């Protein structure tokens, strides 16, 4: 595989980068919401809202 790809530039588009960044952000917020739901005994929506507001630095 390394020999086959050697010397070829990676074909990464802007859409690929946006999708990966969005996926990572969604995973971070969703997993954080699960943790807060478990430890703080909040509803999942409240936990999701808290994580979104906190991580996007709105609040």
Image: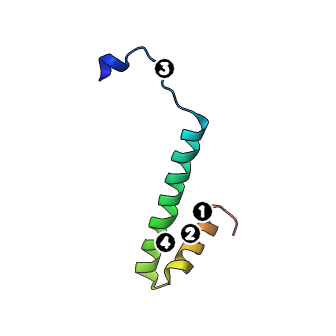
Q: Give the mark, 3 or 4, whose residue is nearer the N terminus.
A: 3
Q: Residue 58 occupies which quadrant of the picture?
A: bottom right
Residue at disc 1, secondary structure: helix
Residue at horizontal 54 percent and vertical 78 percent from the top: 45
Residue at disc 3, secondary structure: loop
What residue is shown with label 1?
Answer: 55
**Residue 25: horizontal and vertical position, in percent?**
54, 56
Contact (Cβ within 8 Å) of mark 2 with mark 4 = yes
Contact (Cβ within 8 Å) of mark 1 with mark 2 = yes
What residue is shown with label 2?
Answer: 51
Q: Give the mark, 3 or 1, whose residue is nearer the N terminus.
A: 3
Closer to the camera in the image, 26 or 35: 26
Q: Residue furthest right?
A: 58
What residue is shown with label 4?
Answer: 33
Q: Residue 15 occupies which quadrant of the picture?
A: top right
Disc 1 residue crowd, few under 14, some 14–19, many 20+, Cα 10 Å: few
Q: Residue furthest top?
A: 7
Contact (Cβ within 8 Å) of mark 3 with mark 4 = no
Residue at disc 2, secondary structure: helix
Select label 1 or label 4 by which is in front. Answer: 4
What residue is shown with label 3?
Answer: 9
**Label 3, label 4: how many angstroms apart (C-alpha)?**
38 Å
Disc 3 residue crowd, few under 14, some 14–19, many 20+, Cα 10 Å: few
């Amino acid at each position: 595989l390394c020999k086959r790809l050697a010397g070829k530039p990676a074909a990464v588009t802007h859409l690929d980068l946006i999708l990966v960044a969005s996926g990572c952000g969604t995973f971070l917020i969703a997993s954080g919401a699960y943790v807060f739901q478990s430890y703080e005994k909040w509803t999942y929506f409240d936990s999701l809202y808290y994580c979104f507001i906190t991580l996007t630095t709105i609040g």
